[in-house]
Image (cartoon, rainbow, N blue to C red):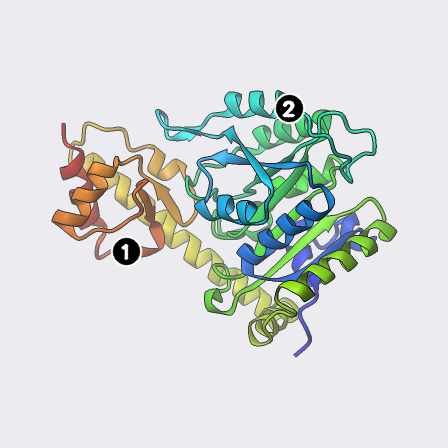
Amino acid sequence: MAKLRDSDCVKLAYGDDSNVVKESRFAGAPALSGTGACRLFAEFQRRFYPDSRMFLPIPAWSNHNDIWRDSEVCTSTYNYYDRDTKGLQFQALMNDINTTIPDPIHLIISQNASDRSFFLLHPCAHNPTGVDPNYEQWKEISHLFKIKNHFPFFDMAYQGIASGDLEKDATAIRIFLDDGHLLGCAQSFSKNMGLYGHRVGCVSIVSRDVKQATAIKSQLQQIVRAMYSSSPLHGPLLVSTILNDADLKALWEEEIKVMADRMIRMRIKLRRTLEELNSSANWEHITKQVGMFYFSGLSPKEVNRLQRDFHIYMTNDGRVSMAGVTSSNVKYLASAIHEVTRV
């Protein structure tokens, strides 16, 4: 088995035929899954852009706040989730992208950038909301990023989990690359390869040329050396074996689709069952959201009652793990949600 190469990983994110890959215009480093990849980039940001800040969505995955805080990088927020519609606050998001306060730094995007900021984006299956921009919205976001000279950092922990299609779930990144952005990306194989305990991931930064990519890679390697020296062996070898064997990779892609399709079916079943119970609430968002999580909109009081009376457990913000919803418990879950949300 060959050592896992960063090029093996970035091909999944950027595409086999991407000019970034063909021209070696990326700096990559193995990481301890997606969390470690984000932590590596945050440390890189702290060292080389000390006056910058990272903009995180509202709501964000809680660990994102912790990662950039512990890296001593300032954070700000941008609007993302609409609690009324349980969907995307697209116009508010665009307004925030357009009106961010410039940071006194010189990003690798441009030596003369005037409105530059770092933004953390989820290319698919946004955590915790499961709400993603559509294709046209991603195009608009990319266009405005270009105008404002913002630097996008994609946290891609769920490639393949949103739609069952690895290529489709990388659409947002491909749009940004086609528009000529330099960008960063954190990848994780915890979910889509079932390697959660093996901590397999990669961080990569798209650069303007090979010389810059080489310089950035050397700095990432120095950070890795001081932080955890090297990544584990067994998990990365499993990933390398799968990605470099056409038959195994095809089988893996089939299994991802089976897994994603099952969660999609459970979403449909959960929504249908709630509607059949004549619930007064609108449950369209269950099937509009994607990925491993259903952001239910349940209040902390309702979540506590589900736990106390029905022994159903979720995070206090109402995030449900769709991986735990099965054909044998979906009706029980729907009935319990109906009971605690009855007016």
230 above or below 135?
A: below
Q: Which residue is mark 2?
A: 101
Return the residue nearer the eye: 313 or 337: 313
Q: Residue at x 71, y 55 (%)?
A: 16
Left or right of 210, for residue 138: left
Tell me the quarter of the image containing the N terminus: bottom right
Q: Which quadrant is the C terminus positioned in?
A: top left
Q: Residue furthest right?
A: 211
Q: Amino acid at mark 2?
A: Ile
Residue 67, percent across and down?
53, 49
- Pinpoint residue 281: horizontal percent, then vertical percent: 23, 28
For the image shown, how many numbered marks are present on the structure? Answer: 2
Give the class, few, some or many, for how many residues have Cα within 10 Å of label 1's Cα (few <14, many ≥20): some
Task: Residue at 34%, 38% (x, y): give it.
Answer: 286
Q: Amino acid at mark 1?
A: Thr
Q: Nearer the viewer, residue 17 or 138?
A: 138
Q: Is residue 24 visible?
A: no
Image position of 294 (left or right of 13): left
| Residue 328 place in picture, x, y as percent | 22, 57
Relative to residue 81, is residue 259 depicted above or below?
below
Task: Tell me the tag on residue 246.
Answer: none
**Distance between the Cα atoms at labels 2 and 1?**
46 Å
**Residue drawn 51% across the image and 25% down it:** 90
Q: Which residue is mark 1?
A: 326
Q: Position of residue 319 (x, y in %)?
A: 34, 44
Of 193 and 188, the residue lying toward us: 188
Q: Are marks 2 and 1 in contact (CB under 8 Å)?
A: no
Q: Earlier in the sequence, mark 2 or mark 1?
A: 2
